[in-house]
Image (cartoon, grey):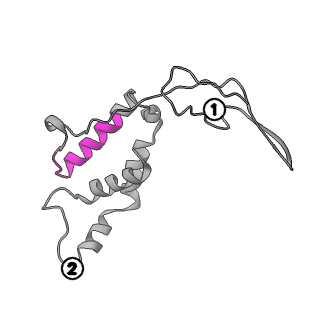
Amino acid sequence: MRPRHLIALLVLVISGGCRDDAAPTGDNAPAAAEALITEEVLRAHVSYLSSDDLKGRGVGTDGDRAARAYLAAELEKVGCAPGGQDGSWEQPVPILGIQSTVTTPLTASGEGGEATFSAPTDYTAVAGSPAASATWDE
């Protein structure tokens, strides 16, 4: 989930955007909705979703499943109904997870000298293809 999509979802959850009885109405609706979105509430959601308990939320991992279950539970709390297939909270999206092993450091040179970078601490290498292997030749 992209960060901006996560924030939009959190705003929906925090503001009670699914329940008719929870949604502010009238001329002061924007101010009333804004009052529900506090730093404390946002911090609590973001803190959990970014916590080490979710172990990075990698595709198909226990952390990924826990994050999705958390979001579904929060949406249900504010009165949303699932809209996915067969009454689920999720829309199936094919996702390919790739784990790469980079054995050669990345070196860059210019007028200021040369710099060497090691993966994965200094950069992340992505092949851009689901092939079983890829090589980087010069």
Q: Amino acid at mark 2?
A: Asp
Image vertical order of residue 63 relative to residue 109, above or below: above
Indicate the position of residue 37 as horizontal and vertical percent values: 34, 62
* Residue nearest the observer in this picture, 125 or 8: 125
Asked whether residue 37 is drawn in magenta, I would say: no
Residue 53 in sight here: no
Q: Residues within 10 Å of mark 2 (few under 14, many from 20)?
A: few
Q: Residue at x 56, y 21 (%)?
A: 133
Query: The residue tagged with tag 1: helix, strand or loop?
Result: loop
Q: Which residue is mark 1?
A: 120
Q: Which residue is mark 2?
A: 27
Residue 39 tag number: none
Q: Quadrant of the C terminus?
A: top right
Indicate the position of residue 100 as horizontal and vertical percent values: 57, 26
Q: Residue at x 39, y 57 (%)?
A: 40
Image vertical order of residue 100 relative to residue 7, above or below: above
Q: Earlier in the sequence, mark 2 or mark 1?
A: 2
- The magenta span reads 66-81
Query: The residue tagged with tag 2: helix, strand or loop?
Result: loop
- Mark 2 or 1: in front is 1
Q: Quadrant of the N terminus?
A: top left
Q: CA distance from mark 2 to mark 1?
A: 52 Å
Q: Amino acid at mark 1?
A: Pro
